[in-house]
Image (tube, coloured by chain):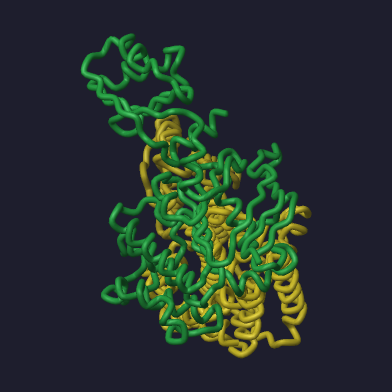
Amino acid sequence: MSAVVLDHIQKWYGKEKTIALKEVSLEVEEGELFGLIGPDGAGKSSIFRILTTLILPDGGKASVLGKDVVDAYKFIRESVGYMPGRFSLYQDLTVEENLHFFATVFGTTIEENYDLIKDIYVFLEPFKHRPAGKLSGGMKQKLALCCALIHQPKVLFLDEPTTGVDPVSRKEFWDMLKRLKSKNITVLVSTPYMDEAGMCDRVALIHQGKILAIDSPEGISKAYPFDLYEVKSDKISVTLNQLRKHISVKSCYSFGDVLHVSFEKGFTAINEVLDAITIDHLEVKKIEAGVEDSFMAYMTN
Amino acid sequence: MRTVRYLLVKEFKQIFRNRSILAMIVVLPVMQLIVMPLAADYEVKNINLIIVDQDRSSKSEDLRTEAISSGYFTLVDYGSDYKSAIQLLDKDKADLILEIPNGFEKRLIKENSAQVLIAVNAINGVKANLGSAYLNNIINRYNEQIKISQSGSETSALIAKLDMVPKNRFNVYMNYRWFMVPGILAILVTMVGGFLTALNIVKEKEIGTIEQINVTPIKRRHFILGKLLPFWILGLFVFSVGMLVSYLVYGIVPSGSLLVLYVYVAIYLLAVLGLGLLVSTYSDTQQQAMFIMFFFMMVFILMGGLFTPIESMPDWAIVVSKFNPMSYFIQVMRMVILKGSSFVHIQSQLFITALFGIVLNFWAIMNYSKRN
């Protein structure tokens, strides 16, 4: 049985009926670590808010653990954990008090489920008498995860848990999620960072309320329809502009301090293209496409 | 029940960690009750008076002494030029001008009557009104004296004199503090209860904690109960502090029973908390909630009958004040504290306040939904 099912879900906001989700359909298997990848405003949070019974969909059906999100909201509220995109614990309560509060609210105790949060809580233990508002970004996220886990949910919804968190804490956080998988908790996580897609079992690329693709990260990369080259240059913006104007170039984007340039599959006249560029000392090599390259390709199609 | 208890524990922890709220519920009532009644004095003193004396006679001198010795006026200038006096009035240096015209004494003796002129600076309405009334009184009294002295001591007994002696019931010395302090306390309890409730819930919205609460199995009624109870207790606490301050500072002891007061306040607070809750369901930020509450508070205070009697308002305002819960509270406070009214006398106020409580809370709970 799929843990989470979205079936042609629609959502629009406001009087202008701005579309947030356009017939979104996806299924998350039990025990899967599933990623929703997309830029800000893609509709990731709307999906989470529908699945956690905070908002009603305007069309389509959604279910969590086989129960409809609209009819069985009471069941869902008891059996899922949700970590909103914004840190939303009580800043003026201490780490321990927050945890205790959420345990009580779900009718359980910290001791009862300590096993599940033990690995994460060890990081927090030294700060347990500190107000939550005074924690660092990474610690806040760990506390929020603890609070979302304290009632042993079967499905965990994490809305951009790593946004605004330093790279080390991000890494730690993903390791924790992998460990949760081994405890048979289904995790649906969203992130705007494409490089995090590789941590998931499967991902859905989402843009402007539409699903572009659902596959494993490897599958997504493999589906890249062009040949991809990496170009290094001293004058990156001039090179970018000239490459973009070239007729054979399918697309050209800057990735940090390098350019990713794509051509039709099997294109061989790459040297001729480079000769047309007025910048000297270009370093070129053929590379495998990543999730981000695929995302860009899907977006422009 | 365990959930409600823990919600209460959590709420009180947060309140006691928030210094500004603590200050608001302890210092605010004490300070305001000590300071405000002193400032909100109905008696007007230090009215700046100019006397333009063009007569310079013994009679005009008498009138001058009479006016100054009353204690209400400060003599800014004593001259004989009306124009320069008017200039001072224009510059707001003076509130009143008393002009004693040339030939005042002569005419008074010859024709048995004379005229004086009073010019009033009406920018400050209260000061102008009371000042000219005081001055009129003084002139009248002076009149009496002249009549008596002119008619001679042997005939003075024959002049009929009607003297009124008012007897003030319930507040024998007409001590304005006795009716101001209970009214101000009513405002304080309303402000603390209303503002704290509204801001507290909106704060949860603003910080996003309500989102986290909404995905938990907490029941709506438990959550709301957990929000209202702490502020109900705090409201009663503020009221008790206020009563203590009025006793210690002003020696105000209710003529009626404390039980009647507390029963009323307990019900009144439900109405105020209901309003706070309602406002919080309609606002998304603390700023919005603050402004909406402020709007209501201004109307409540100005149309509550504390500063101006409701009976003298225009008809539409009287209708509006019927929907002002604070006006009932102020009535009850004065009735119980000054008059010693019991449950029988305040039953209509009690009933209407309870109705407010039921309607506001019901409306608020209906409007508070865990999802949209």
In the picture, the quarter occupied by the N terminus of chain B is bottom right
Q: What color does chain A have in the rendering?
A: green
The structure residue drawn at horizontal position 54% and vertical position 42%, both measured from the top left corner, is: A41
The answer to whether residue B203 of the structure is visible from this angle is no
The chain whose colour is yellow is B
Query: Could you tell me residue B126's position as x and y percent?
Result: 54, 51
Image check: B180 left or right of A267? right
Vertical comparison of B249 with B366: above or below: below
The structure residue drawn at horizontal position 75% and vertical position 82%, both measured from the top left corner, is: B347
The structure residue drawn at horizontal position 28% and vertical position 56%, both measured from the top left corner, is: A168
Q: In which quadrant of the rendered view does residue B277 lie?
A: bottom right
Query: Could you tell me residue A211's position as x and y percent?
Result: 60, 43
Image check: B98 left or right of B75? right
In the picture, the quarter occupied by the C terminus of chain B is bottom right
Q: Nearer the viewer, residue A122 or B317?
A: A122
Q: Nearer the viewer, residue B294 or B206?
A: B206
Query: Could you tell me residue A92's position as x and y percent?
Result: 39, 69
Vertical comparison of A103 with A269: above or below: below
Vertical comparison of B66 with B361: above or below: above
The answer to whether residue A259 of the structure is visible from this angle is yes
Q: Nearer the viewer, residue B295 or A262?
A: A262
